[in-house]
Image: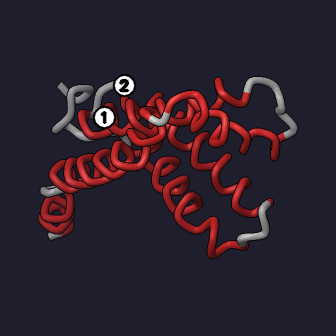
Amino acid sequence: MKTAVLSSLTRYRDAGLLLLRLGLGAMMVFHGLPKLLGGPERWEGVGGAMGNLGIELAPTFWGLMAACSETIGGVLLALGLLFRPACLFLLATMSVAAIHHLSRGDGLGGAAEAVELGIVFLALLFVGPGRLSVDGK
């Protein structure tokens, strides 16, 4: 009985992870691509959030890295390719975004999306991409 219940619960695990990866990956690309295509002025604005961590050097570089993390990381997440490094970069980007919102006085409500996504990326680091992924092949 216990084995049958466990088998039933895990039967759709990989399909669920695929759905999660595709949905989150697409949304990260949706958020990241305009930043990536925004050019140096946009990158500088995004990268200015690193000032909340005491890093004032090269905001344009940090903004480009955040835009690449969201865009390329979103594609890698969806494919399940280099999955854990992509999750790590996305977690770092969401952490900086959450700190930025909190430091601006937006409160937890303003930082909620970044915090929630950070929690998901942290959890995915542990769970992995599943068998229906490039890494799983």
Which residue is the extreme one toward the front? 41
Badge 1 crowding class, 10 Å Cα cut-off, few under 14, some 14 to 19, many 20 or more, is many
Q: Is residue 111 above or below residue 124?
A: below
Q: Is residue 69 visible?
A: no
Among the two numbered marks 2 and 1 on one chain, the one whose residue lies closer to the N terminus? 1
Residue in view at x 25 percent, y 41 percent? 130
Residue 16: x and y, percent?
A: 21, 56
Which secondary structure, mark 2?
Answer: loop
Q: Is residue 92 above or below residue 1?
A: above
Mark in the foreground, 2 or 1: 1
Left/right of residue 15 with respect to residue 73 in the rendered view? left
- Along the line of sight, the residue nearer the viewer: 70 or 21: 70
Residue in view at x 40 percent, y 34 percent? 73
Instruction: Find disc 2 in the rendering and name its residue.
Output: 82
Q: Which mark is residue 27?
A: none
C-alpha separation, residue under disc 2 versus residue under disc 1 = 10 Å
Which secondary structure, mark 1?
Answer: helix
Residue 61: x and y, percent?
A: 64, 24
Instruction: Find disc 1 in the rendering and name its residue.
Output: 75
Disc 2 and disc 1 in contact, CB within 8 angstroms: no
Residue 4: x and y, percent?
A: 12, 64
Residue 75: x and y, percent?
A: 30, 34
Kind of residue at badge 1: Val
Kind of residue at badge 2: Leu
